[in-house]
Structure formats: structure tokens, C-alpha cells
Amino acid sequence: MRNEDITLTAGDAEAVVQPGNGGRIGSLRVGGLELLRQGERFGCFPMVPWCGRIREGRFRDGAAVHQMPLNSPPHAIHGTARDGAWRTARSSAAEAVITYDLVAPWPYPGRVTQAVALTEDALTLTMSVETYESSFPAQIGWHPWFNRTLGGAGAQDARVDFRPAWQEERGDDHLPTGHRVEPRPGPWDDCFGMPGGVDVTLTWPGQLELRVTSREEWVVVYDEQQAAVCVEPQTGPPDGLNTLPRLVTPLEPLEASTTWTWHRA
């Protein structure tokens, strides 16, 4: 089916789904405020079939070692689906379902399905990876670029509030060392553990509060860039294909979801 942009609306909220641009959410406007950084590479893109970096682009599956392209040298980053064209399975005024078939350089056949549902005060993203052939390790995550400021007179930077149980110690190569440490103050490009589920609040003072939640226990927070703040729920840590693989089998797909809930100040 077509892969043209899909505009969803509910109350004063509007989301634009872009199947042809990596299955990303290209825009989310609430009461006229654009929450996502604009641009072909930004918005909110799905990270699948892995999240964050794979060390030197290599991961092991049993006896086999697979090499992914080093698109963030010396590592591979953020999966392959964000670079492909997805297809629209169905859409309505406030919901869209899009799909992507995994292809080379990913070595295993599989299908990714993402459902996007908009209400007046929330956006829910649900993703699954399934296969009818070989089992394989995979991860699911989302990489939203939230605008640091929402514009307007007196607009202030977003404040990030969350209470992780631990922080993955980050090595000089930007990958977890395997040690967990007490959460440290930002700025961050770091992975955190939240065993009760991801729960991070972004507050633009005097304008809007947005809460990012997920049943998953891993979140990467990246706020080192001036224009945006990223809060990335995911099914495992960076390099998780090697350190904490989640297996997709013909009987058991990998599924995850995240919900962003907001209210105006």
C-alpha cells in the first residue's frame, strides 16, 4: 500500500506519521505547539532491530558472527528500519498501522509492525518484530527528539525529571562497560535502568508537561545537543544484541510500547 504521510488528529493534538521516511513520527503538535524537532533525520524514529550502538558493528548469534555497517564509526547504531520505507497497512482519523520487512544488511527475515494511536492527551506507539523462519536476537526502541524549547515569549528550556535505579557506566567508546553506578547528574548520553518501567517527565515551564512511560525497564536520555532532548525507551541497553539479547521466534514475537501523555500548563 501507499507510504505517503499520514496525519492523525484528536482534539487539539495532531501527529504526522511518515512511513516513507523510516516509519518515524515527523511532527506532534499540541495546541499549536510543535513538540518534536523538525527535519528529515529527527521527529521520532523507531530503533529496530537494535537500539543504540553495537560494538564495532558485530553481534553473535550462536556460533555465527554478523557484521552490520559502521554508520557511526567505529560502531553500528540505531537499527536499519529508520533508513527504509515502511508501508501503510491501515489508517483512520486517529490511528495508523505501518509495517517494514527486514532486509539486508540485517541477516534474518522478519516483519516489524508499528501502531500509532493518538488521543486528545496521549500518543501511544506499539511495535512488534515477528518471524516465520529463523529465530534471531533483536531489540525495539524509540528515539524521539523533543524540542528543548517550544518557542514563544519567555519560553524556557525543558526540564527532565526521572528516578532511575541505576545508570549504566559509559566507557570512552559510548558503550556500557557492564558496571552499574549510582545515577549521575547530566548532561547525559547515557542508559538508565528503571525496573518498574520507564517513567520520565519533560516539563516546559508555563507551557506543557509530557510524561514518557513504558513497561520496559531501559531508557537512554540524551540532552547533550542544544536543540533537543531525547528520551528513548527500549527493550535493552546499548550493545544489547551481545549483552542482553531478546529472542524473536516463530512462536514468540518481540513486542514493546510507549505512551506519551501530556497536559497544558
Image (spheres, rainbow, N blue to C red):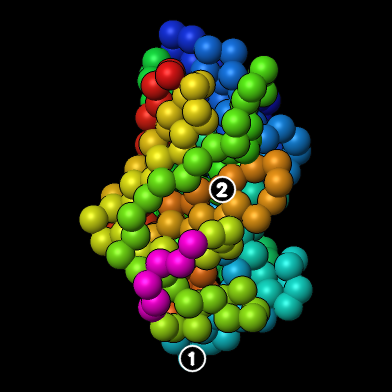
* Residue 128 visible in the snapshot: no
- Find the magenta span and give its range: 180-185
Q: Circle 1: is it few (<14), some (14-19), or many (20+) Cα within 10 Å?
A: few
Nearer to the camera, 242 or 213: 213
- Vertical arrangement, residue 142 with respect to residue 31, above or below: below
In the image, is residue 247 above or below residue 8?
A: below
Label 1 vs label 2: CA separation?
A: 35 Å
Q: Give the quadrant of residue 17.
A: top right
Main SS of residues in magenta: loop
Q: In the rendered image of this protein, does residue 58 appear above or below residue 218?
A: below
Residue 204 visible, this orientation? yes
Residue 100: x and y in percent read: 56, 46
- Name the outermost residue toward the top: 11
Residue 31 on the magenta span: no
- Label 2, residues with CA under 10 Å away: few <14, some 14-19, many ≥20: many
Q: Disc 1 marks which residue? A: 63
Q: Earlier in the sequence, mark 1 or mark 2?
A: 1
Residue drawn where x is 48% and y is 77% of the image = 169
Kindly check if marks 1 and 2 are in contact, taking CB atoms under 8 A apart as contact: no
Q: Horizontally, is 201 left or right of 44 in the view? A: left
Which residue position holds label 2? 230
